[in-house]
Image: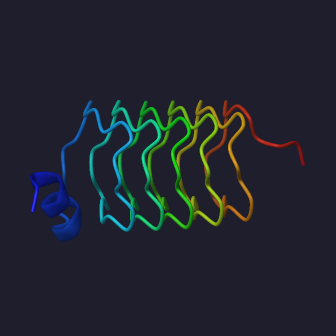
């Protein structure tokens, strides 16, 4: 088992700030509370991952797949989610201030109680 596999399997309060995980397969990973600030997560598979309470401030999640991911209470302020697939994701209570959601798939996303000021790319209601 690689260190990354152990980290995601056993929830070790990971500090992956600034890590380059471009294209990694982290589907179903438990990254609850992890520090992924400023991380390169471009094209990463985070389908069904638990990222509740994670710090994703300034992270690059362009074209990432986050289908059915749990991002409740996560800090995504200033994150780039351009073209990300967030279908059925739970973003309730998440901080999305100044995040870029341009071109993201937000079908059935739960945004209840989320902070959205300055967020770009949200559909007009």
97 relative to 109 in the view: left or right? left
Residue 79, percent from left and from top: 50, 34
Q: Residue at image x 53%, y 46%?
A: 95
50 relative to 81 in the view: left or right? left
Q: Residue at image x 64%, y 66%?
A: 88
Q: Residue at image x 50%, y 63%?
A: 69
Q: Can residue 97 be seen from the camera position used here?
A: yes
Residue 102, percent from left and from top: 70, 33
Residue 98, percent from left and from top: 59, 30
Residue 26, percent from left and from top: 34, 57
Along the line of sight, the residue nearer the viewer: 77 or 26? 26
79 relative to 8 in the view: left or right? right
Quadrant where the N terminus is found in the figure: bottom left
Asked if 25 appears above or below 76 in the picture, the reply is below
Tally of marks: 0
Q: Quadrant of residue 110?
A: bottom right
Residue that extends furthest to the right in the rendered view of this protein? 125
Q: Can residue 12 be seen from the camera position used here?
A: no
Q: Quadrant of residue 29?
A: bottom left
Asked if 55 appears above or below 47 in the picture, the reply is above
Q: Residue at image x 33%, y 34%?
A: 39
120 relative to 31 in the view: left or right? right
- What colouring does the structure picture have? rainbow
């Amino acid at each position: 088992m690689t260190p990354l596999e152990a980290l995601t399997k056993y929830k070790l309060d990971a500090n992956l700030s600034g890590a380059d995980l471009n294209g990694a397969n982290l589907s179903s990973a438990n990254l609850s509370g992890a520090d992924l600030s400023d991380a390169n997560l471009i094209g990463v598979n985070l389908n069904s991952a638990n990222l509740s309470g994670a710090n994703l401030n300034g992270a690059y999640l362009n074209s990432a797949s986050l289908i059915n991911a749990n991002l409740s209470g996560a800090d995504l302020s200033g994150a780039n989610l351009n073209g990300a697939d967030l279908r059925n994701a739970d973003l309730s209570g998440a901080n999305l201030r100044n995040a870029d959601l341009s071109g993201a798939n937000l079908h059935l996303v739960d945004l209840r109680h989320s902070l959205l000021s300055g967020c770009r790319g949200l559909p007009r209601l």
